[in-house]
Amino acid sequence: MLFTGIEGVGKDNAAVAFAMACNCSANRCRQELEKGETPTKNYLPATSQPLPVNACGRCKSCKKIESGNHPDIIRVKPSGVVIKIDQIRALCQTLAMKPYEASTRVVIISDAPAMNPAAGNALLKMLEEPPAGTILILLASQTSDLLPTIVSRCQHIRFNPISRKSLESILVAEHGLDHSEATIIAAMAGGSFSRALAMHRTNWIKRRNWLIQELQALSGGSVNRLLAFGEQLAKNKNKLPEALEVMTSWLRDLTVEKVHPGKILNQDLAATARQASQKISLPSLLEKIEVIQATGNAIKAGTNLRLAMEAMLLKLARV
């Protein structure tokens, strides 16, 4: 099977839950009872409740899988930045042997696009004819990241981004965020639960407000302030893509404000967006967005961060 979708929508959790359901002692007991057979083991404590269809989460098998200690639930992850052919060959050798204890052995290949071409080709035969009682699950963002020959041998299951309302409810109910913070983060997380949590833990809203404030002050600010802003942005390479994304989303909101105010992303800053949008023309906004996107591409190509930031901010101040 091939699970695709953006990061943070639950592909990995679903793969683990599937492995648990395939090997849950309660499910095996239920299947035997449905067939009119006497259960081979007393899998569960005595209970008057119906046996579950999904994994019980309480039996020995479920607990082993959930903790990552089951010998027949195999995880394949990149070694460094790629999944190497030696890893796939070792996997094939393992799958040639019988499982230790699982009724259904499950292989979860995280970040499947990290397989280099040699590793991907080495996996083809196993995907086409997996051993009996073995299921392989590949995780990827999109099918285009994989060799077409791999995609054609998999059953594709697409995971959609999590809706804003669902994400907001989870953040409030399970992680204790107040409603105002959860609303803002749910709107900006792009449907990714892991990203929403990361935004909460890194005080993203405070940083967003600072970035927007500095962006708004560019046209009337001094050169020294502009250069200081550029230096601060360049200091943290890991957070730079996020900073550029915040700037782009803000300029996008100013653009949308002119035609459809209800569709802006930064709803908590709607009044500020309305005032700022009135002070700048649509062509200028579109040009600013292009400047930021071009800078992002230049950074990916390896340009000097400090010089790239200074050049970008000078252009934004002039547009």
Image (cartoon, rainbow, N blue to C red):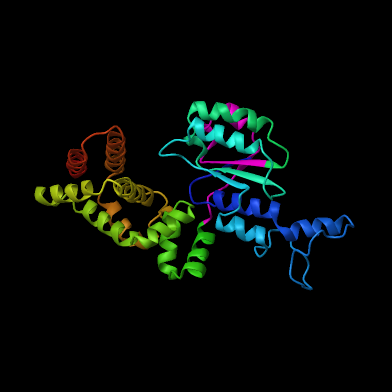
164 vs 159: above or below: below
Q: Can residue 262 be spotted in the picture? A: no
The picture quadrant where one finds residue 304 is: top left
**Quarter of the picture holding the C terminus:** top left
In the image, the segment drawn in magenta is 135-163
Q: Can residue 76 be spotted in the picture? A: yes
Residue 159 lies in the magenta stretch = yes
- Depth check: 307 or 212 in front? 307
The spot of residue 19 in percent (x, y) is: 64, 51
Which residue is rendered at x = 83% and y = 60% of the image?
39
120 vs 47: above or below: above
The spot of residue 145 in percent (x, y) is: 50, 33
- Depth check: 254 or 2 in front? 2
The spot of residue 17 in percent (x, y) is: 62, 54
- Depth check: 153 or 239 in front? 153
Which residue is rendered at x = 50% and y = 45% of the image?
6
Residue 206 lies in the magenta stretch = no
Q: Is residue 24 left or right of residue 218?
A: right
Which residue is rendered at x = 21% and y = 48% of the image?
235
The spot of residue 23 in percent (x, y) is: 70, 53
- Depth check: 261 or 36 in front? 36
Q: Is residue 258 left or right of residue 68?
A: left
Which residue is rendered at x = 64% and y = 28% of the image?
125
